[in-house]
Amino acid sequence: MNFIDKLLEASQTNNSLLCIGLDPDPELMPAGMGILDFNRAIVEATADLVCAYKPNLAFYEAMGRDGFITLEGTVACIPDNIPVIGDAKRGDIGSTARAYAKSLFEMFGFDAATVNPLMGFDSLEPFTDYADKGVFVLCRTSNPGSADLQEELLANGPLFEIIARRAREWNVNGNIGLVVGATYPDEVSRVRQLCPDMPLLIPGVGRQGGDLASAVRYGVDSKGQKAIISSSRQVTYASQGDDFAAAAREAASSLRDEINRYRKDV
Amino acid sequence: MNFIDKLLEASQTNNSLLCIGLDPDPELMPAGMGILDFNRAIVEATADLVCAYKPNLAFYEAMGRDGFITLEGTVACIPDNIPVIGDAKRGDIGSTARAYAKSLFEMFGFDAATVNPLMGFDSLEPFTDYADKGVFVLCRTSNPGSADLQEELLANGPLFEIIARRAREWNVNGNIGLVVGATYPDEVSRVRQLCPDMPLLIPGVGRQGGDLASAVRYGVDSKGQKAIISSSRQVTYASQGDDFAAAAREAASSLRDEINRYRKDV
């Protein structure tokens, strides 16, 4: 099954637009707990509440070779019906991009990956060539510094709009999505206007301070779908005690329900 | 010793601006040879001819967990006096960028890394905070698709020029450099004008078709230094037979000498 169909099916089955980021931070976990055990417990506690999981590779790479094995194990413990987005933000030239795509889609087996478009389409094509995989192009990221370049004004609008327009042209296999931070609701709205059918991956709710209501209302497509609202720490570290899994389930459940309330307003 | 001093010292000792990219492709190696053995032989054959080595992480990641171990081993077999640039092109938000920086600078022990500036300065700062490490910011990359965004015209010039100007502002620790492809000599010249003192990492000579003479003449600073001319396959796969190491040495030696001839013209 291709990524979009898998996403929509998981979203429908679980009545959820919530994506949980699996970004291990040992300091925020119950003392002495292994990361893979932690991730497995989080997944078991929340797998009926989400439309996707999103491990960010940086946190695994920072652990060296053990991190690699932990990431493989994490992907393996996610149920087959839930898509997994490898948040890697890779971008490089042709043969190198092919190696990254192979790593993400074949070695780790992610259903989708995030990519950085600065180097242009020939750096993304090795990813989009995997027609059954999803490719989320960074467009307007959730961090304050994103304005440094992404808001630079070009003749036809700011850079992030150019990226959204280009993404439409590049979308020959229908598997491109865009990353737009919940911290910039006007930009979420503008990107949804420009790309009415693309899935939008929307991080930045919770501790980054993004406005959840606007992210959902502006982010969904005309059917109230295809917005992937991503939250990491707010859910995974809801409690640092032995009740962390139950607390994560409660946080995920209430976040899903809140998202669904805003969805109904559309 | 900080990266720039180490680079200049290696460059002076070996009378070289040549950087060899260590991008393993088993299909181009002698049949049955292990990648770490191959890299070690290349390094032993060329360590007195280069100013730096540059492994691109993609090719190691594509091998899964074995690749990780191979990359660690490769870094370990490079003599201490030669800087190693981790070509990773990472870019992510604050805490995630810190994890990437930790992975590259602490786990792998690279002397420098390449980074992608699309997400803005707060995504680069965790790298530049390592004041003794070098941070090469993608500016005008060597691939044809780089024009898609990097040549987009802003009010003050194309995007790559904005990146070069911003890099000057961001360079509070004096450890930023820029990546500019040899395939775009006018842009190399322009970036050198804008950033007279920064090290420039210049890929794209050899099989990508960049003009070596222009890359050197335009790329060096006023003292004929700080251009890092990077070549990968042209050197490492000069022969696919048992004589691959000797052939790599010969290719590296003649490339170094050719670079030095153009340097003299400055």
Image (tube, coloured by chain):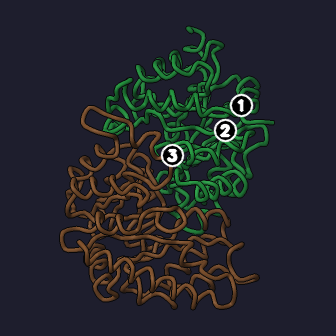
Chain colours: A green, B brown
Q: CA distance from mark 1 to mark 3?
A: 27 Å
Q: Is residue B108 left or right of residue B39?
A: left
Q: Residue at x 58, y 82 (%)?
A: B39
Q: Is residue B31 left or right of residue B231?
A: right
Above-or-below relation of A139 to B165: above
Can see residue B147?
yes
Front residue (pair A196, B96): A196
User: How packed is label 3: few (under 14 Cα within 10 Å), some, or many (20 or more)?
Assistant: many
Circle 2 sits on which residue? A134
Front residue (pair B246, B47): B246
Give the secondary structure at mark 1.
helix
Q: Residue at x 21, y 53 (%)?
A: B194
Front residue (pair B173, B9): B9
Q: Which mark is residue A4?
A: 1
Circle 3 sits on which residue? B145
Q: Name the N-terminal-most of marks 1 and 2.
A: 1
Q: Position of residue A181 (x, y in %)?
A: 45, 31
Quarter of the view holding residue A15: top right
Q: CA distance from mark 1 to mark 2?
A: 7 Å
Instruction: Answer whether labels 1 and 2 touch (C-beta < 8 Å).
Output: yes
Give the chain of mark 3.
Answer: B
Instruction: Answer whether labels 2 and 3 touch (C-beta < 8 Å).
Output: no
Above-or-below relation of B161 to A8: below
User: How packed is label 1: few (under 14 Cα within 10 Å), some, or many (20 or more)?
Assistant: many
Q: Position of residue A12 (x, y in %)?
A: 74, 23
Q: Position of residue B237 (x, y in %)?
A: 61, 77
Which quadrant would the N terminus of chain A be assigned to in this image? top right
Kind of residue at badge 1: Ile
Closest to the camera, between mark 1 and mark 3, is 3
Above-or-below relation of B43 to A49: below
Give the secondary structure at mark 3.
helix
Kind of residue at badge 3: Gly
